[in-house]
Image (cartoon, rainbow, N blue to C red):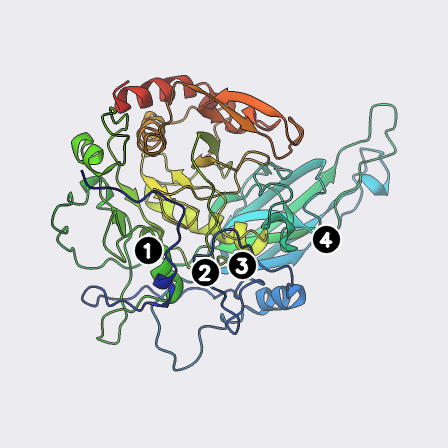
Amino acid sequence: MRALLVTSVGVTCAAALTLPLAAPALSAPAPHSASARPPWVSPESPGSPGSPGSGPPSARAEAAYGEANASDAAPPSARAGETRAAEPAGSTQSLPLEPLAAPSDRGLGRSAAGQGLDRRTARPFSLVGVVWDDAGAELHGTVQVRTRATGGTSWSDWQDVETHNAEHAADLGSAERASGAVRGATAPLWVGDSDGVEVRVRPEAAGPQHRSAAVPLPEGLRLELVDPGEDPAPEPARAAPAGRAATPAMFAGNPVPPTTTTGMPEVLTAESAAASAVNAELAPLGAAVIPALTKAQTEEAAIVAAGAKPYIGPRPGIVTRRGWGADERLRERNFVYTRSVKAAFVHHSATGNNYTCKQAPSVLRSIYRYHTLSSGWRDIGYNFAIDKCGNIYEGRAGGVAKAVMGAHTLGFNTNTMGVAVLGTYSSSNPPAAAVTAVSKLTAWKLGLFGANPKGKVTLVSAGSNKYKKGRKVKMDVISGHRDGFATECPGARLYKKLGTARTTSAKLQGR
C-alpha cells in the first residue's frame, strides 16, 4: 500500500527550484495593467518558504500600496531583463469614496448621506468591492453599485453588495489577523468586463425613534476595482505519468499554464514551484490539474490504520492554482497548517451568478486579488472552490491533501476546511453539479483524516459573533458557514442541500 503524504510538513526546498516545463506556446495577451506586490512581500526579504505558523510581518507599506495601485506600477519582481516565468497579470484600482449629497426625501440629515462615487470611467475591471481601514469595524448599512460594460453606453441596474462584516476571515489572535495588513471588506461582486462604475454606501438609521441619527460608516472607505488579467494560454497536452490516471475530460476546457515566447521552456518562479511542490505526491510539478483516481486507486494511495477499512471517496479531479492562473507573487510565501481536518464548512462566494463556467478561473483570480491586495489576507481565504458546472479548484496554497489553515469561517478555521461554491444562493438554487462536487470533494478530503461526512464533531471556537472564545461546539462534520457564525452564508438554498451532500459523501466513502 503506497502512502500518501498528509502530514503538516511543508516542502521547504521547493521554493528555490526553477523547473522547465512543456514545449513553448503562445503567451497570454498583455493585460490591462499589473498591480504591485502585496505590502507584506518584500523582494529583498523573501522569508523562508514552507515554515508552518508564520504569517505576514506586521510592518506594511500602506502608502506604497495605495500609490502603486493608483499608478499601476509593475511588481518589484518584474525587473527589466530578468528571466522569469510568464505570470497571469491583473490590476486593482483602489479609489477613496467621497461624501454623497443627502437624499432630499429621507430627512435623515447629512450624517445619513453616506459615501460613494458618481458615474465615472475607469480602466477595465470585472469585480468590485468596498474595503475600510479597521478590520474589526462593521459596516452597518447598504452598499450598491452599477456598472457599464466595456465599450458600451448603457448602465446596469443597481446591484447590492453583501456587506460581509468579517465573517469570512482569519481567526482573532492568529498571526494572519494580527499582521496589521487586514482590512474590513464587503463581499466581492462579479460584474463582468466593465469600464464604468458608480457606487453608493448608505448607513442604516440608529433606530425607529432616532430618524435623525445614523450608525457611522467605517473610516477609510475605498472602492476596489479588480481586473483578473488574461487566462493562461494552453500548453500542448502531456501524457499522464506512469501509474497515474489521465486528466479528466471535464477539465479539457479549463485554462492551463502559459509558456514563454522566447523559444525556451518556461521556468517556474520560486513561489510557483513551492505552491506546486506541495502537491508533488498527487501530480507532476507544474501540473494544471490533479487527476481523478478511482476508489480503488485512492484507497491504495491513502494512509489507513492496519486492518481498518479505508472509508474514503475516490479522489476527484482538481484544477490546481497553476491551472486557474494564480499569480503566486501576491500571497504570503509561507504555508500554515493545522493538525487535522475534522470538518468542512460550505460557503457561497456571494459574487453573484452572472458568470459562465469558462469564466470561473477569472472569478477565482479576482477573489484571490481581492482577498490578498484589497483585504490584506495572506492568500485566498477558501481551501477549495467549486463552480456551477461542478469543477473543483485548489484554493489556499499548501497542498490539497494537507490540513492547510484557511480564513473562511471566523472562529473555526483550525482543523477545518472551507469550500466555496462560486455564486450567490440566497434565493437561487445551486446547480446539482455543484452540490455533487461538494459531496465528491468532502468524501475524499475528509476521508483522508478519518472523518464521517454524516457524523458530528466537537470544535473549539476561537471567537465569533455566535460562540465566544473557548466554547466547545458540536456541529455536523459537513456544516454551513452559518453554523459557526451568525450569517446568511452559504445562502438558504445551498444550506438546504447540505443534507443531500452529507448522505452522498458518506456513500462515496463506502459507509
Query: Disc 1 versus disc 4: distance between alpha carbons?
Result: 37 Å
Mark with earlier residue (1, 4): 4
Q: Residues within 10 Å of mark 2 (few under 14, many from 20)?
A: many
Q: Secondary structure at mark 3?
A: strand
Residue beneath disc 4? 220
Q: Residues within 10 Å of mark 4 (few under 14, many from 20)?
A: some
Task: Tell me whether circle 2 and circle 3 mark residues in contact (CB < 8 Å).
Answer: yes
**Amino acid identity at mark 3:** Thr
Residue beneath disc 1? 276
- Quadrant of the rendering where the N terminus is positioned: top left
Q: Residue at x 18, y 41 (%)?
A: 249
Q: Residues within 10 Å of mark 1 (few under 14, many from 20)?
A: many
**Amino acid identity at mark 1:** Ser
Query: Disc 3 versus disc 4: distance between alpha carbons?
Result: 17 Å
Task: Tell me whether circle 4 and circle 2 mark residues in contact (CB < 8 Å).
Answer: no
Residue beneath disc 2? 90
Q: Residues within 10 Å of mark 3 (few under 14, many from 20)?
A: many
Q: Is residue 262 above or below residue 336?
A: below
Foreground mark, 2 or 1? 1
Residue beneath disc 3? 92
Query: Disc 1 versus disc 3: distance between alpha carbons?
Result: 25 Å
Q: Secondary structure at mark 2?
A: loop
**Amino acid identity at mark 2:** Gly
